Amino acid sequence: MSLTEADLSGLKAWIEGLPGVASGPHRFGGVEFKVQQLEFMHFHGQTHLDIRLSKNDQAKALAAGKAERHLYAPQAGWVTFRIKSRDDIERAKELIQLAYKNASDVLESHQPQQGKSAKA
């Protein structure tokens, strides 16, 4: 199926609809998406996505051919995904959901444990 602007706008709206997500300009161009202040993905143009996964999810996605190796920061879990058709939107959402969960888990792991003393 051919890809439309509405498909791409719908994907961005879906990402922005994830709890706690904010979007804004990316420092290298495009649009980035963050949970609190932690970036978990960004667009370069309309169809080039860079997505930050856990190292385990990154290895699985690359081995399965679901993503491409990121050119500049693969050591940090980043992968690249290119949207070529409408069918790729759902595949992109799978990777984005993994990245969102990873970012949320990282943030949660840095929160103080409720009921524990800071001096403990």
Image: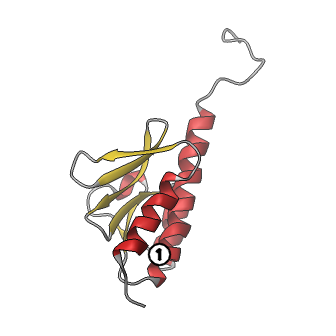
For label 1, the SS is: helix
Q: Of 27 and 20, which appears nearest the observer?
A: 20
State the residue at coordinates (51%, 60%).
14
Q: Of 81 and 8, which appears nearest the observer?
A: 8
Q: In the displayed orientation, state which residue is furthest to the bottom.
A: 1
In this rendering, is residue 35 above or below 99? above
State the residue at coordinates (35%, 64%).
49
- Residue 87 in the figure: left or right of residue 83: right
Quadrant position of residue 47: bottom left
Q: For the residue carrying disc 1, how many other residues have a C-alpha within 10 Å: few (<14), some (14-19), or many (20+)? A: some
- Mark 1 lies on residue: 89
Q: Position of residue 36 (x, y in %)?
A: 49, 36
Quadrant position of residue 41: bottom left
- Residue 49 in the figure: left or right of residue 88: left
Quadrant position of residue 3: bottom left
In this rendering, is residue 101 above or below 93? above
* Image quadrant in which the N terminus is located: bottom left
Q: In the displayed orientation, state which residue is furthest to the left.
A: 28
- Residue 27 in the figure: left or right of residue 111: left
Q: Position of residue 6 (x, y in %)?
A: 40, 73
Q: Position of residue 109 (x, y in %)?
A: 62, 35
State the residue at coordinates (34%, 45%).
24
Q: Position of residue 42 (x, y in %)?
A: 36, 55
The tally of labels here is 1
Q: In the displayed orientation, state which residue is furthest to the right.
A: 115
Q: In the displayed orientation, state which residue is furthest to the top.
A: 119
* Image quadrant in which the C terminus is located: top right
- Inspect the image, locate mark 1, and give the three-letter code of the amino acid beneath it: Ile
State the residue at coordinates (46%, 66%).
11
